[in-house]
Image: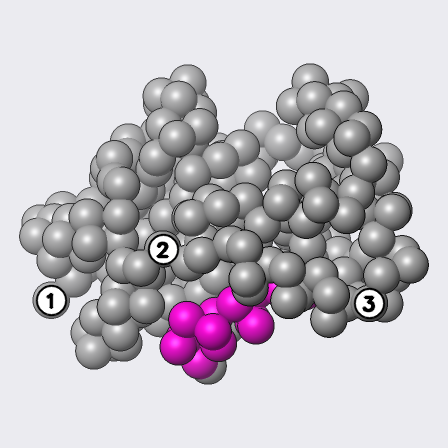
Amino acid sequence: MPLVGSVLIDFDGTACTHDVAEHLMDRFGEPSWREWDERWLRGEVDTRTAIRGQVAPFAGLHDEELIAYAVEHCPMDPTFAPFVGWCRDNDLATTIVSDGLGLYIQPMLAAAGVTNMPVITNDWARGTMAFPNGHPRCDWCGTCKMLAVQRAARPVAFVGEGHSDRYGALYADVVFAKDALVDLCRDDGIPFVAYETFDDVRASLGSLETLPGPLAPEVCPGWHTA
């Protein structure tokens, strides 16, 4: 039996092979959305400010138009749905944890045949961006992945690929990383298992005999209050 009690999974670039938010901003946004990303990476603006700036051009669009484009143009990882089924067969709770736009996640999961899966994310609806899953005191991230890990059934496996996954990875018992998250884990000293597909994650979870455990710094390095 796997050693973990729950698996938290990033969405954009992880469960889905594309960064859906970026595709939507390329199609419906303004070219300046990339400048917001660059400012965020430099630490000049928080996630919430950056996202609100990026999606401002969406205000005149119907949510259904954005969702339809995402479902048509952004395929899910074909190994994701079988992985979720395996987790359920082994009584592992699976949750999507995303710092993206939120509105397309449930429709895309449904299109992939994945139902009844909890989603922790931001909320874009009818021209308004909200952040119901942020930290009550830190305002840097939209969705606080640190809190998501801390509140999950332990031990926790975290599967991600990008900068928004860094703070969740710090608090997980085992981290599966690809792309930008690999270098972030190395920089932060986080033990990780490299993966390409969810078949890799499943094989590792099924064979791990020990877990690295979380670094769990007392204060998240992204901590910021207004």
Closer to the chain start, of discs 1 and 3, is 1
Would you call the spot at circle 3 few (<14 residues within 10 Å), some (14-19), or many (20 or more)? few
Q: Is residue 137 magenta?
A: no
For disc 3, the marked residue is 62
103 is within the stretch colored magenta: yes
Residue beneath the point at 82% across and 67% down: 62
Say few, some or many: other residues with alpha carbon within 10 Å of mark 1 (under 14 / 14 to 19 / 20 or more).
few
The residue that disc 2 covers is 77
Residue lying farthest to the bottom in this orientation: 116
Per the image, label 3 sits on a secondary structure element best described as loop
Query: From this viewpoint, is residue 60 visible?
Result: yes
Label 2 secondary element: loop
The amino acid sitting under disc 2 is Asp
- Disc 1 target residue: 1
Q: Residue furthest right?
A: 60
Q: Nearer the viewer, residue 209 or 54?
A: 54
In-front residue for pair 57/199: 57
Residue 119 in sight:
no
